[in-house]
Amino acid sequence: MKRQLGLVLLLVTTLPLLADEPEISAQLGLEIRGQGNRRAKARDTIKLNERVFAYTMAAQDSYQYVILTAAGKSRLINAGREKAYKGEAEAFPSLEQGWAPAGTGPVEVTFIISKQMIAELAPLQNGTSADDWRKIEEKLREKARINDAAGKPTPIAANVRSIGASVFARQLPKYSGSGIIAARFHLDVQN
């Protein structure tokens, strides 16, 4: 009887833990610096002389991938810095040096956050064609579920560079999903 009671108590205490398995979540977004600093919308226009900074802040230890697609090429802009730690804000390519557009036209920045390393993204370390990236992305997007909890725009600190990535990242919308998060920003670069 004691043995059965012990087994029942064990099941009762572990079932709620299994039912409440946490989803993966992170705060993601882009900052555009030029005449002033502003948070990019999902579809936005930028000027040639502006710089783009990608920010992530994971709610749990995870892997993060920030992919830049421009002029028919795709590459990982955070190569070598894929591991994300709970609550740590990251700026890519770096907090001091953003990405500057090389010419006019469409640009996409895709964020992928995962509980596990994604081996399929290895070709992006050195860059690949946008077509090859689309094939990889399609497979990953089938797995992703995105919930944007942002409802309204949030203010941006006036001088993010001196304040740090953490302050800016905390103001970004939170995305969540089970297993993988995928979010894409479309930028139109103009003169």
Image (tube, rainbow, N blue to C red):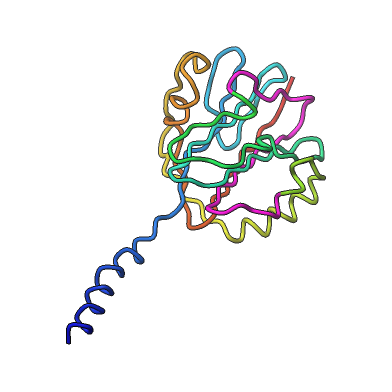
Whether residue 157 is in magenta: the answer is no
Residue 5 lies in quadrant: bottom left
**Who is closer to the viewer here, 73 or 9?**
9
For the C terminus, the image quarter is top right
Q: As drawn, which residue projects farthest toward the front?
A: 2
Residue 25: where, in percent of width, then height? 45, 47
Residue 60: where, in percent of width, then height? 44, 45
Q: Residue at x 64, y 53 (%)?
A: 118
Whether residue 104 is in magenta: the answer is yes
- How many marks do you count on the picture? 0
Residue 2: where, in percent of width, then height? 17, 83
Q: Residue at x 49, y 40 (%)?
A: 85
- Asked if residue 18 is positioned above or below residue 180 in the image, the reply reads below
Q: Residue at x 61, y 41 (%)?
A: 82
Q: Is residue 9 left or right of residue 14?
A: left
Residue 92: where, in percent of width, then height? 61, 30
The span picked out in magenta is 95-121
Q: As drawn, which residue projects farthest toward the left?
A: 1
Q: As drawn, which residue projects farthest toward the bottom?
A: 1
For the N terminus, the image quarter is bottom left
- Asked if residue 65 is positioned above or below residue 8 in the image, the reply reads above
Q: Residue at x 61, y 31 (%)?
A: 44
**Who is closer to the viewer here, 34 or 92?**
92
**Who is closer to the viewer here, 17 or 28?**
17
